[in-house]
Image (cartoon, coloured by chain):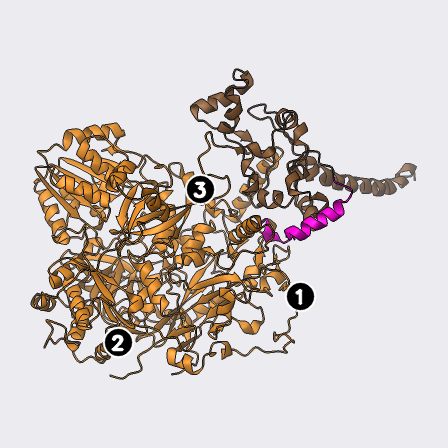
Amino acid sequence: MSTTPNTYWRSLNELARNDEYRQLVEREFPENASELTDGYSRRNFLQIMGASIALAGFTACRKPMQKIVPYTRMPENVVHGNPLHYATAMPFMGSVTGLVVTTHEGRPTKVEGNELHPDSLGGTHILHQASTLDLYDPDRSRGIRQGDEARTADDFAAFCASTFTRDKRVAFLSEASSSQTLNRLKRQIAGRFAASTWVTYEPFGEENVLLGTAMAFGAKRRPIHHYDKAAVIASFGDDFLAAGPDSVRAAKQLAKSRKVMSTEDGMNRLYVVESNYTLTGTNADHRIRVKESEIAQALFALAAALGADGFGGHTNAFTGNGDIARLAADLRGANGAALVTAGADQPPAVHAAVAAVNAALSAVGATVTYAALPFADAADQNAAFRALTADLAAGRYDALVMLGTNPVFTATGDVDFKAALSAVPAVVHLASHIDETSAALPSNGWHVPRAHYLEMWGDGLSFTGAASVIQPMIQPLFGAWSEIEVLSTILTGSRTGGHDLVKQTWTGSDWNRILHDGLQAGTSFPAATVRLTGAAAIRAAAEALPTVSGLEVAFKADPKLIDGRTANNGWLQELPDTITKITWDNVALMSPTTAAGYGVEFPRASILRAPADEEPMVAVNVNGKTLELAIWVVPGHADNAITVYTGYGRTHAGRVGNGIGVDVNPARTSSSPLFASATATRIRRTYPIASTQDHHSMEGRPLIREASLSGYREKPDFAAKMVKVPGPIDEAGQPISLFDEQTFPDHEPQWGMTIDLNACTGCGVCTIACQAENNIPVIGKKEVKRGREMHWIRVDRYFSGDVNGNPQVVHQPIPCMNCELAPCEQVCPVAATTHSDDGLNQMTYNRCIGTRYCANNCPFKVRRFNFFNYPKTWLIEGNDPEVVQMAMNPDVTVRFRGVMEKCTYCVQRLNRAKIETKRATGDSRKPADGTVKTACQQACPSDAIYFGDISDTESVVTRTKRNERNYLLLEELNIRPRTSYLAKLRNPNDATA
Amino acid sequence: MAQLFPEWSNRVPRMLLVGSVFFVTAVVFFFWHFGSHDYLEVGYAPKQPIDYSHRLHAGQLGIDCRYCHASVENSAVASIPSTQTCMNCHAQIKVDSPKLALLHESWETGAPIEWVKVHDLPQYSHFNHSAHVNVGVGCESCHGRIDRMEVVMQAAPMSMGWCLDCHNNPGPNLRPVDQVTTMGWVAPPNQFELAAEIIARKNIAPPVYCNACHY
């Protein structure tokens, strides 16, 4: 196989090298980025400045008085200034993941994975990292309300006592929950009322998976995949690496066999069959590009090729397809070490077929085990939700209790939940915000503020069945209630604290040990014995699935906002999408060929009348609704198909999420929520999109180095040899430098980092973890569009290959490289960026005067400038917005406007570790290897980032830097970056079908 | 034609020249002196909500610094004691003193006492107490003779130059670690050898790069 450099590009403009792209990259920031164009003119800006300087001049005469507020009664274990760490777990879509939360004086500021927890093993995903910001969301609901009237907790308890009497017909609607306490109360409720219904409503949950296994095995079973045991993995529309209930474990296990450290090491092979390019698709060794509606057909063809039960003689459009035949041969050749998965949003028949295929591959018990869920309802919950809506509208219930969920927003277009609400005499909605559903309650409906998981007692089971207790880090900020507290109040008519309710469930357990560890040791779902009984039913259901022959629209859960539940989280909104690098919007994703059909061709100069910085729009007519969306071209998207993300277009999310993007839920139908046939026409409007894909460009240098596994085995040092370093070499083997060499070889430690591109999945959790750790502000769409985004570590995404066919994608996280001969340091006129003894390129905020020369001279474009006082912009409107400040890390300075900033290798962690090591040992200079981790490294679910002391020849990071895959970016410039990369490998199937 | 300028005007340029030298010197001195930490910071002694006397408690009664500032050896901050710490004694001593009314009110209501910060470093400077007291930098080296202060006063300029003076040459400010809280500690005649021994034993290399404090 070839090891020659591919051509990598980040956007179609870059591929075309058109004028627009050239203009963009030649400027340090896009046009107007350095100008102050909003609100005030230069003249009245100077007036304002003059006035504020005058005022400042007077106020500065007096020293500002700072207060120190100590405790009244000192809590046990608190040492001022030292954070405490507590284990807890975050519930999400019916599973909990074990976390360890850092609290500063009782204020949770950062979450990390719990290394003891089998579904975290120390890793996290973006929703975990961003959850601290949700806790301090100033738009959270502030108290119990009935209609528009504020009510007290006693009022609500009295209402419950009088309303929920035994003779009532009560409906309950909840999110998926594995909480043992919630399910205990649920069983009590079942026997309590004259008639009661409990519906679990999770728009993008695993109900289809459970229905599929029920079809195959006769009972709902959760498939648990063991990616580390599989040599060949095939995903059918399953984005298992994107943030979800099981994604951390999946990333850990997948990365395990992709960390090829020598030519002896093997590597698994990942096939992904999908329509839109997803995170998992970018990591595939083979990606098969089909329309969303064809994924099922491709799977059925595979099932037929493998002789899976029920598919004998089945033929469809994919029968005889070369890719599928080759996949079938590869899966069969893995001798049981093969695994097939399907996306949870695929219809039940697909999951049933997957079960049949895995059984045919002898994968059951090896790479996939099945678990009986103690909390799963036997009935079809998707159908139950539709039936409930109809029953509510028909007045068949006296009361409705909604525990979380936002059905008015998330329900598909054919389900009018809002109308059903008005037909119920008594409604209770537990929600963190006055969201669309709470706003649509009848005038006597109750809204109860819902507790964030960091402020409540609870419990739950992880995806693999590890039992955890959720313990609160802080008192509920706004008098919020947890689900179990509401349920217990409904049952008893008086409020019982969550702690007592959970403790009742866990009587007889080793309570303190469980709280300390974050889980009950040794608990997991036992592997259920399964027998494929529904072969004929699967075949029938499979052949009944609809296909779309013309243009199709696929509705997918947004990887960041899911169904819109995290829409008010600025960190998530501003995190660039894995593939499109779009922030703050949803768009109509389509392939270049499809876009060309709407007159959108590249190079962009041919776009009719579109302003250069706005995107053309398309009106998509689907299920009788029209969605007007910006066109965004994704190379590798299936042709004749459009993908749109849900979760946008919210009206009651809060100040961050309101009015961001377009709500596509009305165009979905409950019979086929995943895809629908559509027509689309180009409209003349254009729309601005803030995508970061061309920002911080490094202009086509060989930054990504990649080879196939066989190519690597032939030539292991392909990456290091790819670039010839010019000029004379000194006796140490280094090129001679013009500048003072600042390596401080005698000083220990010397910090360095290695990033394994083969383990990195590109999920972006490093960016959010860094944002949480380092108080990085959110700046909003308009500012991102101007190229002012503040992320200290970005994940560059490169395409390579055929733009109109099936290009490949590589991700590359770029933090500050901490160059030993840093170009930024040479140009700073005030020595605000200099070198530290332990090899850090340090940024001293108080010295910076904001010339931005350093950013201009940085070849990696990792420096970020505070054009405005960003931390303050979110703190000036609404109901006490300063609550957001509680999310700040007190160990890191909050930067003011006019100051440059960048990745520091988390120097606050390094300094703390050094001081604590010295205190503990009395004399040691440096922390032991592995005891200090940067925020990005700690958060990474696939352990792709190594960090440590490179003066220690035996440290893990030094060993990775000795690896043959190791290479430096822009080595030819002789700037000696401290961050190096391990080259990307792929493991393509060389066999021809 | 009569002379336009009187004779003394010949002296004007010279006077202006001399005067401007004085003026510039005065301006430089003004900012150098009145703008310095020595002038602006040293001697800052704000009124506290309770007239707590360090002279009485630390000086006459001889209470160890760490009885109240308990986290000084383990944390970046020395910490201001909780009301509870005060109440350990004042639950029985001077219970009816009007000066302690606020203390008892705090204990009963749970409302914390809002002390005024005296030693106020800028937010971008991160000072760590534990890193200093555990290697033998005494409390009084920075805070002065607290045991003689009726009202706590800032004794040192706490400017960056002042920090660096010691970071460049820590010897004169080192003492045996068991003496860090001693007030009025007198350096022994062999301070030079003593400091050299502490520096070697504790492996002291005070950082002078920016990131040691600014991040």
- Horizontal side of A450 relative to A817 (left or right) equals left
Which quarter of the rendering shows the C terminus of chain A? bottom left
Q: Which residue corresponds to mark 3?
A: A885
Name above or below for residue A495 compared with residue A655: above
Pinpoint the chain carrying mark 1.
Answer: A
Tag 2 and tag 3, C-beta contact below 8 Å: no
- Horizontal side of A829 relative to A18 (left or right) equals right
**The magenta segment:** B187-215
Name above or below for residue A551 compared with residue A444: below
Which color is chain A depicted in?
orange
Residue drawn at (24%, 32%) of the image: A495
Q: Which residue corresponds to mark 1?
A: A740
Q: Measuring from the top left, give residue A725's x and y in whole percent.
A: 57, 77
Which color is chain B depicted in?
brown
Name the residue type under label 3: Gln
How many residues crowd mark 3 within 10 Å: few (<14), some (14–19), many (20+)? some
How many residues crowd mark 2 within 10 Å: few (<14), some (14–19), many (20+)? some
Q: Which residue corresponds to mark 2?
A: A334
**Discs 2/3, front:** 2
Tag 2 and tag 1, C-beta contact below 8 Å: no
Observer-nearest residue: B32 or B62? B62
Q: Measuring from the top left, give residue B93's x and y in whole percent.
A: 54, 19
Q: Is residue A786 visible?
A: no
Observer-nearest residue: A630 or A221? A221
Cα distance, mark 3 to mark 1?
42 Å
